Amino acid sequence: MTDQAPTAGATNAEAGEPLVCMTGVDKHFGDLHVLQDINLDVAKGEVVVVLGPSGSGKSTLCRTINRLETFESGTITIDGEPLPEEGAALAKLRADVGMVFQSFNLFAHKTILQNVTLGPIKVRGLGKSEAEARAMQLLERVGVAQQAQKYPAQLSGGQQQRVAIARSLAMQPKVMLFDEPTSALDPEMINEVLDVMSGLAKDGMTMIVVTHEMGFARRAADRVVFMADGQILEQKTPDDFFTNPESARAKDFLSKIL
Ligand code: ADP
Ligand code: MG
């Protein structure tokens, strides 16, 4: 190791800046102050699990980072760059910030393979054969390579969600957002999706995960962020959060789910 300045081409995050940086972010839906002075930094390779009661603003927080929602004040940067407003830069942002939702949102009339190659061909400009080769590797990685020629409806929910993860990964995102990725799944399929996510975390993917799976939060999170009523009330290690919640809201939340 030398203490020279980062080499040209190094990303801002590699130079030690947070990959995702939210500062003083505020957002209203009409009278509802849904995000209140949100300050959240996520380092490269960090796994942040966002917990909190229903309606606390967790989904809105994720959607704001991906610019699926606008916000009124404050700043959000990804790898040092402010969120773009529109056009090609916004398409690139959506590729850099992968998002996996509760509902898998696969394209119903495209095969699994086409679902995974579409973005890389259209947005990243990859050739078809290269996109397909990479897609097959990713489908292998999430354990659904054998389903590549099938259509989404022919797959189980757990398989579809793993395809959705592969589809995001195919864009080579800098950070992945997961918004309750297992909430719509039958219980026996939850672990196959969480296992894929744990693997990603181990491989160093930067992740923000909204989930009610407390086992996953304990195992995989570097940090737990607890939200209630549009505010971040606590940010601490999972051990610290689960054994030593400080706010009344967090104590109440944990007493109901543990
Ligand atoms: P969570 O994901 O923590 O359950 P959400 O971010 O989905 O919370 O919602 C936070 C609050 O904002 C809720 O009260 C919800 O009803 C409200 N809300 C979410 N989306 C909209 C919208 N598009 N228009 C108006 N209110 C919304
Ligand atoms: Mg939500």
Image: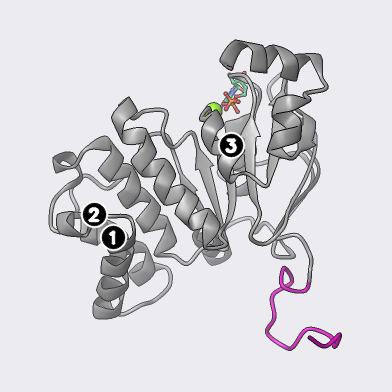
Amino acid identity at mark 1:
Leu
Q: Is residue 184 left or right of residue 211?
A: left
What separation in Å lies between label 1 and label 3 (alpha carbons)? 25 Å
User: Which quadrant contains ligand 2?
Assistant: top right
Q: Secondary structure at mark 1?
A: helix
In which quadrant will I find the N terminus?
A: bottom right
**Toward which corner of the image does residue 189 lie, by quadrant?**
top left
Q: Secondary structure at mark 3?
A: helix
The tag on residue 70 is none
Amino acid identity at mark 2:
Val
Could you tell which of marks 3 and 2 lies nearer the N-terminus? 2
Q: Secondary structure at mark 2?
A: loop
Residue annotated with mark 1: 139
* Residue 5 rendering spot, x and y as whole percentages: 84, 85
Magenta range: 1-15
Relative to the observer, which residue lies in front, 219 or 110?
Answer: 219
In the image, what residue occupies the spot 67% across and 62% down?
44
What separation in Å lies between label 2 and label 1 (alpha carbons)? 5 Å
Nearer the viewer's eye, disc 3 or disc 2? 3
Residue annotated with mark 3: 217
* Residue 156 rendering spot, x and y as whole percentages: 21, 38
Query: Do labels 2 and 1 touch, CB within 8 Å?
Result: yes
Could you tell which of marks 2 and 1 lies nearer the N-terminus? 1
In the image, what residue occupies the spot 13% across and 42% down?
154
Task: Give yes or no for residue 181 being in the magenta stretch.
Answer: no
Residue annotated with mark 2: 144
How packed is label 2: few (under 14 Cα within 10 Å), some, or many (20 or more)? some
Q: Is residue 17 left or right of residue 184?
A: right
In which quadrant will I find the C terminus?
A: top right
Q: Is residue 191 left or right of residue 253?
A: left
